[in-house]
Image (tube, rainbow, N blue to C red):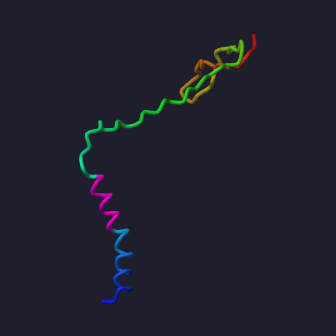
């Protein structure tokens, strides 16, 4: 085996060996405290309703004619009002 081939083989094998050494050291237990999972604060959502809005509703009863007979049926209509 020539010296050039030996150098090429060592150059190709060096990164693999360094990766194996780093991997092995990562597996050894450490004396440091174990990491706890990071806790993220929930995003704060502010809801600001429009000023002085309320619902105004009107309701009434309506006669509806059905095959079984006439029925008194409740109706309602609502809308938003300022003030």
The spot of residue 71 in percent (x, y) is: 58, 21
The spot of residue 10 in percent (x, y) is: 35, 76
Residue 16 lies within the magenta run: no
Q: Residue furthest front?
A: 3
Magenta-colored segment: predominant secondary structure:
helix
Residue at the spot x=72%, y=14% of the render? 51
Q: Residue furthest bottom?
A: 1
Residue at the spot x=29%, y=36% of the render? 33
Q: Is residue 3 left or right of residue 63?
A: left
Q: Is residue 83 above or below residue 73?
A: above
Q: Is residue 12 left or right of residue 67?
A: left
Q: Quadrant of the N terminus?
A: bottom left
The spot of residue 55 in percent (x, y) is: 68, 15
Hey, which quadrant is residue 11 in on the image? Answer: bottom left
**Camera sees residue 57:** no
Give, as a single range, the part of the protein colored magenta.
17-26
Q: Nearer the viewer, residue 40 or 47?
A: 40
Q: Residue furthest right?
A: 82
Q: Nearer the viewer, residue 19 or 4?
A: 4
Q: Nearer the viewer, residue 25 or 70?
A: 25
Q: Quadrant of the C terminus?
A: top right
Q: Is residue 37 above or below residue 15?
A: above
Count of all numbered marks drawn on residues in the image: 0
Hey, which quadrant is residue 52 in on the image? Answer: top right
Residue at the spot x=29%, y=38% of the render? 32
The spot of residue 62 in percent (x, y) is: 65, 18
């Amino acid at each position: 085996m020539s010296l050039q081939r030996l150098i090429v083989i060592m150059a190709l094998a060096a990164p693999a060996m360094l990766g194996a050494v780093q991997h092995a050291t990562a597996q050894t237990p450490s004396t440091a405290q174990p990491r706890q999972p990071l806790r993220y604060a929930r995003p704060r959502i502010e809801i600001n309703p429009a000023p002085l809005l309320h619902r105004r509703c009107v309701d009434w009863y309506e006669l509806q004619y059905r095959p079984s007979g006439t029925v008194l049926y409740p109706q309602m209509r609502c809308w938003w009002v300022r003030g």
